[in-house]
């Protein structure tokens, strides 16, 4: 009989431990959901801050946006020789003053230069600044 009683006691202790573990797991799962919500909120906040930082220049000053053709003109003035649209595109993609969601940014640049009287086309995809 003592053998049966000790077995029952041991089984009961295991059940109590399992119950405690289940409660702990339940609490941890709730905490995990809460933390996931906080992480999502922080990600949104970080994305918003990243957009603000992207729009700022040196010293934290907000960059003034310029028309694309004006930025191209500045680049071409510094170059002082004919430049390919591909080269311009690569420079403009790195320039923080210019943003484009265009699928074909090359065509946007070429069209802007064709429509401007500040540039002459000297070859296929090659332009020079008139000034």
Image (tube, rainbow, N blue to C red):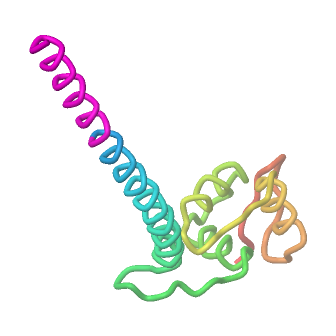
Q: Position of residue 119 (x, y in %)?
A: 79, 69
Residue with the most extreme left position: 2
Residue ranking furthest to the front? 1
Residue 31 in picture, x, y percent from top left: 37, 57
Q: Is residue 20 positioned above or below 58 on the image?
A: above
Picture quarter with the C terminus: bottom right
Q: How far from the left and from the top, in percent, is residue 38?
A: 43, 65
Which range is magenta?
1-20
* Vertical comparison of 28 with 73: above or below: above
In the image shown, does 86 or 100 lie closer to the viewer?
A: 100
Q: Looking at the picture, tell me which residue is in the foreground, 48 or 123.
A: 48
Image point (27%, 42%), residue name: 20
Image spot of residue 9 (x, y percent) = 17, 26
Residue plotted at (50% across, 62% down): 40
| Residue in the picture at 76% in, 52% down | 126
Q: Is residue 130 left or right of residue 10?
A: right
View extreme (right): residue: 115
Position of 111 relative to 71 (above/below): above
Q: Does the magenta stretch include residue 19?
A: yes
Report the front residue among 57 and 12.
12
């Amino acid at each position: 009989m003592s053998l049966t009683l000790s077995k029952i006691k041991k089984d009961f202790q295991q059940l109590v431990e399992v119950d405690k573990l289940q409660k702990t797991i339940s609490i941890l799962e709730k905490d995990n959901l809460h933390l996931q919500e906080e992480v999502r909120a922080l990600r949104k906040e970080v994305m918003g801050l990243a957009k603000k930082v992207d729009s700022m220049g040196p010293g934290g000053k907000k960059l003034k946006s310029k028309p694309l053709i004006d930025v191209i003109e500045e680049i071409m003035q510094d170059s002082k020789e004919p430049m390919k649209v591909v080269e311009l595109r690569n420079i403009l993609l790195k320039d923080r003053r210019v943003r484009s969601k265009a699928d074909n940014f090359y065509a946007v640049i070429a069209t802007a230069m064709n429509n401007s009287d500040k540039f002459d086309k000297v070859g296929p995809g090659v332009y020079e600044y008139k000034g």
